[in-house]
Amino acid sequence: SVKISNPSSETISDLTAEFNVFISNIDVGDGIVNKVTIPPKSYENSEVTLIIIYSDVGQAVINGIKTANFDLSIRGDAKLSVLFNLITITEPFSATYSYNS
């Protein structure tokens, strides 16, 4: 699960997210966050579904071993409803963890 926070003073309704997982810029999987509603100035824990493509993981791991470093990244889009479900917003997001020995 992931912890999703809402620092705003408005409720975030029906937040969902779809993202790709990359190891050394090789796409190794897809993930989704199912619908979650987050009250103002609080957070919710949400389950994440992650599908790993094993055939692509092998090449990414080999590259990481050979170079003794790799980046683990996620990139995707979050969709949410605000202002009493009158407006839907799509927001891109990304995060990267770099490992260097």
Image (cartoon, rainbow, N blue to C red):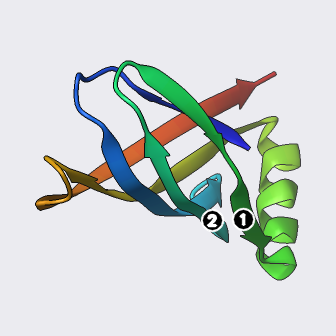
Q: Where is the C terminus found, in terms of image quarters? A: top right
- In the rendered image, which residue does mark 1 sit on? 49
Residue sitting at 23 percent across and 32 percent down? 10
**Horizontal arrangement in the rendering, residue 76 relative to residue 35 (left or right):** left
User: Relative to 55, does residue 7 appear above or below in the rendering?
Assistant: above
> x and y percent of residue 68 in the render?
82, 35
Marks 1,2: beta carbons within 8 A: yes
Q: Name the foreground residue: 63 vs 7.
A: 7
Residue 30's quadrant in the figure? bottom right
**Label 2 amino acid?**
Gly
- In the rendered image, which residue does mark 2 sit on? 31
User: Relative to 29, does residue 38 appear above or below in the rendering?
Assistant: above
> x and y percent of residue 96 in the render?
54, 36
Q: Secondary structure at mark 1?
A: strand
User: Relative to 64, does residue 27 appear above or below in the rendering?
Assistant: below
Q: Residue furthest front?
A: 84
**Label 1 amino acid?**
Thr
Label 2: how many Cα within 10 Å (few below 14, some 14–19, many 20+):
some
